[in-house]
Image (spheres, helix red, strand yellow):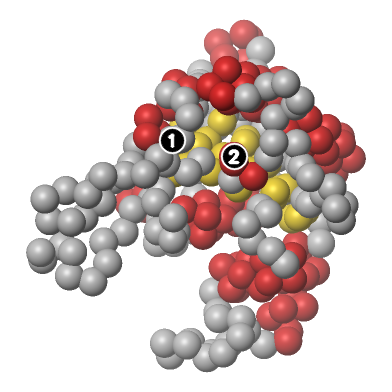
């Protein structure tokens, strides 16, 4: 917004999920355009699933479009099936826990809705993705399709340009992600894996923070909004 917009209307409203069932989440988490949003969590604790749920809600509630670079979720058809489960609220393959699986009409309705809403980004066969490639692809999608949200899942699935490595390369990439979001007034969701977490005296893993993301404290320092997904399994809470 311009200075006159700010003077007239005040600070822009933060973006919160409008759908039912997210009220408590909205009390502690919201985002804005121009922000880098970083999520972390121990593997298999659900950070990717949780992030995609948030993004899908924003697409529904604010009529946005998203580009998802998620090489961990391959093949692409299986990733689509997982997105359909989240979007329609029904299991895709079989009836489960009292919920009937998605019908062919559910799938078709999703396809028609997602056709101009969700873009799954992947390199051509045999091409190894780099950060330079991804930034070029994001710019192309932004100008061609009007993308509002870009998802990178995960940071370590892209290689740096030749001759760059280590903390300096990580920090430079995070700076570029932050500037990309700010310059184009879009949101960038970034998933970053933590370093190996230590267990407490009960044998439970500590809850990671963004400072625990592997490679650099800038995962926290350069992030506008962040979250960690952590679950307790079995009897961990009672133990």
Q: Is mark 2 in CB contact (under 8 Å) with mark 1?
A: yes
How crowded pointer 2 is (Cα within 10 Å; few <14, some 14-19, many 20+) is rated as: some
- Work out whether residue 27 can be spotted: no
Q: Which residue is mark 2?
A: 155
Instruction: Determine which quarter of the picture holds residue 94.
Output: bottom right
Image: 99 above or below 150 = below
**Exactly how many numbered labels are in the figure?**
2
**Image quarter (top left, top right, bottom left or bottom right) of the C terminus:** bottom left
How crowded pointer 1 is (Cα within 10 Å; few <14, some 14-19, many 20+) is rated as: many
| x and y, in percent, of residue 215 in the image | 48, 29
- Front residue (pair 175, 55): 175
Provide the secondary structure element on which disc 1 rests.
loop
Residue 184 placement, left or right of 189: right
- Front residue (pair 124, 231): 124
| x and y, in percent, of residue 48 in the image | 52, 55
Please tell me which residue is depicted at 57% across the width and 55% down the height of the picture.
52
- Work out whether residue 166 can be spotted: yes
| x and y, in percent, of residue 136 in the image | 83, 32
Residue 222 placement, left or right of 72: left
Q: Which residue is mark 1?
A: 213
Residue 211 placement, left or right of 15: left
């Amino acid at each position: 917004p311009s200075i006159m917009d700010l003077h007239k209307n005040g600070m822009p409203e933060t973006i919160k999920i409008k759908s039912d069932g997210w009220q408590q989440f909205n009390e502690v988490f919201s985002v804005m355009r121009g922000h880098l949003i970083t999520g972390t969590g121990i593997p298999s604790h659900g950070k990717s699933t949780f992030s995609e749920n948030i993004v899908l809600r924003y697409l529904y509630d604010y009529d946005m479009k998203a580009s998802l670079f998620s090489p961990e979720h391959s093949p692409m058809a299986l990733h689509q099936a997982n997105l359909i489960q989240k979007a329609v609220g029904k299991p895709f393959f079989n009836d489960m826990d009292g919920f009937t699986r998605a019908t062919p009409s559910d799938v078709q309705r999703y396809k028609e809705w997602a056709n101009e809403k969700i873009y799954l980004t992947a390199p051509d066969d045999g091409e190894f993705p780099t950060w330079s490639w991804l930034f070029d692809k994001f710019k192309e999608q932004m100008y061609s399709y009007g993308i509002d949200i870009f998802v990178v899942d995960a940071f370590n699935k892209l290689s740096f340009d030749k001759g760059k490595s280590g903390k300096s390369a990580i920090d430079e990439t995070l700076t570029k992600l932050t500037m990309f979001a700010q310059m184009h007034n879009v949101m960038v969701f970034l998933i970053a894996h933590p370093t190996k977490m230590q267990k407490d005296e009960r044998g439970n893993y500590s809850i990671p923070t963004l400072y625990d993301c592997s490679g650099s404290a800038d995962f926290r320092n350069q992030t506008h909004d962040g979250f960690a997904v952590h679950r307790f399994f079995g009897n961990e809470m009672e133990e």
